[in-house]
Amino acid sequence: MIWLDRNGFADFLNDVDWLIPARPTGANNMLTVIAGSMIGVASTVFSITIAAVAYASGNYGPRLLTNFMQDKGNQFSLATFIGTFVYALVVLRTVRTEDEVAASAAEAAFTTLPGFVPQLSLLVAMGLMGLSIAVLVFFLNHIPASIRINTVLEGIGRRLIEDIGKIYPDPNKGYQPEKAPDGQPVLAVESGYIQIIDFEGLVERAEEADARIALEVRTGDFVHPGMMLARLCKEEVGNNEISDDLAAKVRSEFTFGATRTPEQDPQFLIDELVEIALRALSPGINDPFTAITAMHWLGTTTAYLGTRDLRKYVIDSEEDGIARIIPLPDDFEHYLSRGFGNVRTGAATSPAAALAMLDTLRNAAAPIGDETRKALLKREGLRLIEQVREHLSGPDLQEVEARYVLFAEALPG
């Protein structure tokens, strides 16, 4: 913008009758006010964000910190205020008062008033100030809305459904996962959570060795030196050792970190829903309705998983069309246990949560055509009622027993 002002592209503003050109003193004052107010607002916004994050992590669980720090609304608000502040400072340093000499003859030629005021840049600064005011109003509405528990649960649930669709794109047709052949182990040499597995890179490594790679870990698993990451399966290799160079190349396709991330790891988001539900059902909080909402989203994702082919599809070799990577199988029972299996203990202590869990399991079975998976849902309901009988008594137990009868009738077999 300053370049445009210095090179005469703002001359058309002199022909706008209703636009009064700013003088150097007024421009200095206005830009100073904009810069000072924007950095003050940015500091306040940052403080509010930290307070909201502290509140959410304390009430919903520390693993939700990532969700709030990655919130696009918060990022956009902070970027707008800081960007406006920096822009105002950059423009402010170019304003020249009447008693100052122009830096160049060209700069002096392109202003009709004493001194130099970048009129076009100043108008943009005014526009950014107006945008910042609108963003501030948006932010003050966005923050309280973003920490509402229903909004948090919806965000987790919808992202989980989206991730499941990406990882398991095909509907269930009853295929069974392939059993991996024997092979030479590739051991880890560092500790941490597996955050990303580069399947394309592993395919290249397998093609180089003319072999197949059977994974022994999933994204989200914690490993330490000596643990097996994968096995190199090659029929003609026999018991030959893998070269250190090839093992290092295979290990380089695994990204490790200090924390789990939701990328490639639907279990991470399932664990977040479980954590919120268990915290809500704890005696210190005793909020069964939050737990019920979390179970509703667990039921939605469980039903979706029940209709998907849970074999992970990876890139085949371009040369021979062979599936070079054999990932660990992800079966429906595993995900069911990770979700409702972990919530069950807490739900069994609350009549409202137990009733909701039975209804949610019954509804989750509705779109699932695989009878084996429906039987797993029924088994989860049976385990729940067994634990309920240990914790509840009297009318509460009778009501849950009656609901279980309806549940069992809806899932025969």
Image (cartoon, rainbow, N blue to C red):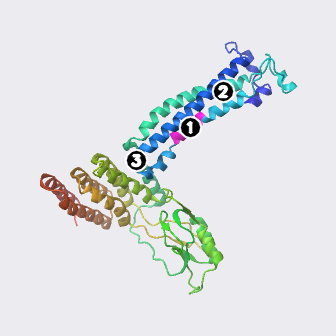
Q: Can you give x and y, in whole percent of width and height, for residue 378 in the image?
A: 26, 63
Q: Which one is closest to the eye, mark 2 or mark 3?
A: 3
Disc 2 packing (10 Å; few <14; some 14–19; many ≥20): some
Distance from Cα at disc 1 to Cα at disc 2: 19 Å
Q: Do residues under tags 1 and 3 come within 8 Å of each other at their CB atoms?
A: no
Q: Which one is closest to the eye, mark 1 or mark 2?
A: 1
Q: Can you give x and y, in whole percent of width and height, for residue 353 in the image?
A: 25, 52
Picture quadrant of residue 146: top left
Residue denoted by label 1: 78
Q: Which one is closest to the eye, mark 1 or mark 3?
A: 3
Tell me: residue 345, above or below residue 245: above
Span highlighted in magenta in the image:
72-81
Q: Can you give x and y, in whole percent of width and height, for residue 130 in the image?
A: 58, 25
Distance from Cα at disc 2 to Cα at disc 3: 42 Å
Answer whether residue 319 is visible to the viewer in this image: no
Magenta residues: mostly which secondary structure?
A: helix
**Amino acid type indicated by mark 1:** Leu
Using the image, tell me which numbered label, if any, was put on residue 58.
3
Q: Earlier in the sequence, mark 2 or mark 3?
A: 3
Which quadrant is home to the C terminus?
bottom left
Decide which of 87, 295 is in the foreground and name it.
Answer: 87
Which residue in the rendered view is the most extreme toward the top? Answer: 17
Does residue 181 show up magenta in the picture? no
Residue denoted by label 2: 124
Q: Earlier in the sequence, mark 1 or mark 2?
A: 1
Q: Can you give x and y, in whole percent of width and height, for residue 136 in the image?
A: 52, 30
As helix, strand or loop, the secondary structure at mark 2 comes to helix
